[in-house]
Amino acid sequence: QVQLVESGGGLVQAGRSLRLSCAASGNIFSINAMGWYRQAPGKQRELVARITSGGSTNYADSVKGRFTISRDNAKNTVYLQMNSLKPEDTAVYYCNADGLYRRGSQYSAFESWGQGTQVTVSS
C-alpha cells in the first residue's frame, strides 16, 4: 500500500508561519491529487487545500491568501506553507493522497491518510 508521513507541526504564536510536509512512499505508480485536511476539537474534518498532479489548486475560504499548497512530484511530497497563522487555525492537520499503486503485475487504486500533525497557534 501507500504510506504518508507528515512533519512540521508545532506550537507557534499568532501571525507567525509554519511549513508542513508530507511524503508518500510505497509501490506508487502515480499520484493524482494530494491535499491537507484539518480537524479541530469538537469539529468535523475539513479540507484546507488540495493540489492535482497538474498543479491545479483549491483552498478553503478561511485560508485563501494565507496558505499555499505545493508539491514535488519527483519526491511524491506535498507541502503546506502557512503564513499569518491565527488561533482558529489550531487543529490536527492530515495529509491525503490518491492514485495508483503496483500490486505485482497489476495496478490498484489507493487513497491514503497520514497520521496527523498537531498545529497550535497561541494568541
Image (cartoon, grey):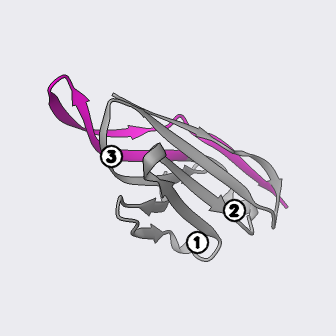
Judge depth for marks 3 and 1 and give the one in front: 3
Residue type beneath disc 2: Glu
Please report the bounds of the magenta region as a residue range. Answer: 94-123
**Residue found at x 69% / y 62%:** 88
Answer whether residue 43 is visible to the viewer in this image.
no
Q: Nearer the viewer, mark 3 or mark 2?
A: 3
**Spatial separation of the CA atoms under disc 1 and disc 2:** 10 Å
Q: Are marks 3 and 2 in contact (CB under 8 Å)?
A: no
Q: Nearer the viewer, residue 46 or 98?
A: 98
Q: Which residue position holds label 1?
A: 62
Earlier in the chain: of badge 3 and badge 1, it is 1
Q: Is residue 86 above or below residue 109?
A: below
Picture disc at residue 98: 3
Viewer-proximal residue among 11 and 7:
7
Check contact, mark 3 vs mark 1: CB within 8 A.
Answer: no
Q: Amino acid at mark 3?
A: Asp
Res 20 visible:
yes
**If you read the primary sequence from the N terminus, does the residue marked by circle 3 or circle 2 appear first?**
2
Give the CA separation, mark 3 to mark 1.
24 Å
Residue to which mark 2 is pinned: 88
Secondary structure of residue under mark 2: helix
Q: Is residue 2 left or right of residue 109?
A: right
**Mark 3 neighbour density, 10 Å: few (under 14) some (14–19) many (20 or more):** some
What residue is drawn where x is 58% and y is 66%? 68
